Image (cartoon, helix red, strand yellow):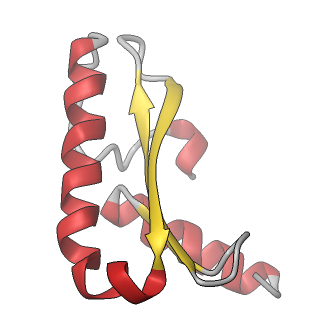
Amino acid sequence: MTSRRALLASLKAVKQRGVSTVDSGTVSGVLSIGAPIFGADGQVVAALSVGGPTARMAERVKAVEAAVSEAAEDISRLLGYRGPWPVVDHPTAR
């Protein structure tokens, strides 16, 4: 991100979708998709992330986003989280 405005817009999109997708963020040519994992108290306790070469993952972004979100929800439910998914009203997401 090169500006506060871009960062806030990105965070808003992540909040609405429940997943974050970054292409060449930390490592050039690597696409990463991540989602938060919530505990029984509704607090973020971990995160799940998948990454791979952009050249291979670019055509599968939507499917991988769905899989990451579903896995993060499954883990959150196993940890006792019972709220809505994606978690759009989490206080730290504002």
Q: Position of residue 83 (x, y in %)?
A: 24, 28
Q: Position of residue 18 (x, y in %)?
A: 35, 55
Residue at x 65%, y 73% (from the top left corner)? 8
Residue at x 79%, y 79% (from the top left corner)? 4
To which quarter of the image does residue 10 belong? Answer: bottom right
Asked if residue 38 lies left or right of residue 2, the reply is left
Q: Position of residue 89 (x, y in %)?
A: 39, 44
Say above or below: 84 vs 58: above
Say above or below: 17 vs 7: above
Q: Nearer the viewer, residue 60 or 78?
A: 60
Asked if residue 37 lies left or right of residue 4, the reply is left
**Quadrant holding the N terminus:** bottom right
Asked if residue 92 lies left or right of residue 2, the reply is left
Numbered circles on residues, count: 0
Say above or below: 42 vs 22: above
Residue at x 21%, y 37% (from the top left corner)? 84
Q: Nearer the viewer, residue 9 or 52?
A: 52
Residue at x 19%, y 45% (from the top left corner)? 70
Q: Position of residue 22 (x, y in %)?
A: 54, 74
